[in-house]
Image (spheres, rainbow, N blue to C red):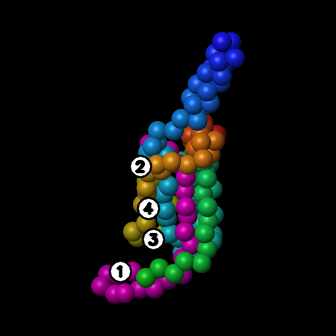
Amino acid sequence: MPFLTGLIRAGIRTMSSNTYIAGTHSMAFVTVPNVDVARKLAHGIIQNRLAACVNIIPGLTSVYEWKGKVEEDSELLLMIKTATDKVADLSKFVRENHPYECAEVISSKIDDGNPPYLKWIGDTVSKPVQK
């Protein structure tokens, strides 16, 4: 019986440390015109604890309609991992620091993922901002 009790305790510890509530974290996507803007935004986002990680992905071609004309531009994509409750502040930061008149900031909630990684996102964005 002591073996079974220990096994149950270990299972409960494992379950509680790896539990993730779907939608607690989000991925946000932001397009930028060049690597300098990408780096500036990424560093500001991380320094302000608006996200745990920003991937800078080069090599996009965006085709879109803007002011009645079809446009085509080379861009980079920021893939941003954050807590869902930080998305509004993240969006505000991007709007205030992005060179585009109408910056793309879209997000999607994360349903599932690697539990330690998801925990790291939550732990990282919940730390106080360092001045």
Magenta-span inclusion, residue 45 = no
Q: From the image, which quarter does the C terminus lie in? A: top right
Q: From the image, which quarter does the N terminus lie in? A: top right
Q: Which residue is mark 3?
A: 100
Q: Are marks 3 and 4 in contact (CB under 8 Å)?
A: no
Question: Tag 4: residue type?
Answer: Val
Q: Measure the alpha-carbon separation of dots 2 and 3.
A: 18 Å
> Which circle marks residue 88 in the picture?
2
Tally the marks: 4
Q: Relative to 11, say whether 87 is above or below.
A: below
Q: Position of residue 59 (x, y in %)?
A: 59, 78
Nearest the camera: 20 or 107?
Answer: 20
Q: Measure the alpha-carbon separation of dots 2 and 4.
A: 10 Å
Q: Which residues are magenta?
A: 64-86
Numbered disc 4: secondary structure: loop
Q: Nearer the viewer, mark 3 or mark 4?
A: 4
Q: Position of residue 121 (x, y in %)?
A: 59, 44
Q: Relative to 27, say whether 70 is above or below.
A: below
Magenta-span inclusion, residue 72 = yes
Nearest the camera: 82 or 21?
Answer: 21
Q: Residue at x 42, y 60 (%)?
A: 106
Q: Which residue is mark 1?
A: 66
Sequence-wise, which precedes: disc 2 or disc 3? 2
Question: Tag 3: residue type?
Answer: Tyr
Sequence-wise, which precedes: disc 2 or disc 1? 1
Pointer 2 local density, CA inside 10 Å: few below 14, some 14–19, many at least 20: few
Numbered disc 3: secondary structure: loop
Q: Quarter of the image holding residue 80?
A: bottom right
Question: Tag 1: residue type?
Answer: Trp
